[in-house]
Image: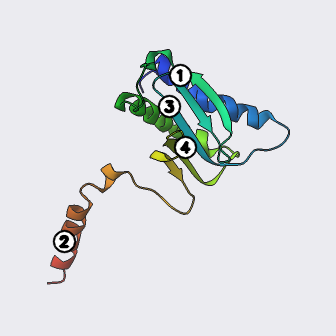
Amino acid sequence: MMKPNEVQIQLERLFRTPIEKAESASSPLAINDLFVQIDPATGEVELFNDKDEELHQVVIYDWIQEGRTEIPAEMMQELRTVVKRLQAENFFDKDVFVRPFSLALTEEDFTVIEELLFIDDELIKLDSSLLENLDEDLNNFLADLLSDMK
């Protein structure tokens, strides 16, 4: 696995810091949804809970692009990479995360730009790359199955 760069370390801190605080708090926290907002003009990345309360914020100075309002693809890719790494480490399996759980990148008004993660014990959301050749695979399987019946 690749070593995380400084940006990824800061993004991981965005998630880890408030959750670790919540785990050590006397009153338990239950989170169904997390929302990430990126401001490319200031480099601010904010994490909100499902009550639209800010949980944590980091400033990524490498991301500051004054006057820019649209989130560049590179920023979104870095965020996806960190979410995948945290998921692989079972970070989102902690007791504070209630199922179904979702993590989304949103605009300032909480309009979803991209759903980064969805976890439900009863549902499995498949990545589009898994579905690319599904039709062809199912057709081949069915053809093989039916050829035995002839």
* Amino acid type at image mark 1: Ile
Residue at left 43%, top 19%? 66
Q: Residues within 10 Å of mark 2 (few under 14, many from 20)?
A: few
Question: Of the residues under marks 2 and 3, which one precedes in the sequence?
Answer: 3
How far apart marks 1 and 2 lie (CA) works out to: 49 Å
For label 3, the residue is 38
**Disc 3: CA contacts within 10 A as few (<14), some (14-19) or many (>=20):** many
**Marked residue nearer the N-terminal end (1 or 3):** 1
Residue matched to label 1: 9
Q: Reading the chain from its start, which is encountered first: label 4 or label 3?
A: 3
Q: Secondary structure at mark 4?
A: loop
Which of these two is toward me, 31 or 52? Answer: 52
- Residue that mark 4 sits on: 109
Q: Are marks 1 and 3 in contact (CB under 8 Å)?
A: no
Quarter of the view holding residue 57: top right
Question: Between marks 2 and 3, how big is the CA–CA gap?
Answer: 50 Å
Q: CA distance from mark 4 to mark 2?
A: 51 Å
Which mark is in front, 1 or 2? 1
Instruction: Give residue 39's position: percent from left, percent from top.
Output: 49, 28
Measured in 3D between alpha carbons, the distance from the residue under mark 4 to the one under mark 3, in whole angstroms, is 12 Å
Of the residues shown, which amino acid type is indicated by label 4?
Asp
Find residue 81 and report its horizontal and vertical position in percent: 43, 33
Give the amino acid type for the residue marked by disc 3 in the picture: Ile
Check contact, mark 4 vs mark 2: CB within 8 A: no
Q: Which residue is mark 2?
A: 144
| Three-letter code for the amino acid on which mark 2 is drawn | Asp
Disc 1, SS = helix
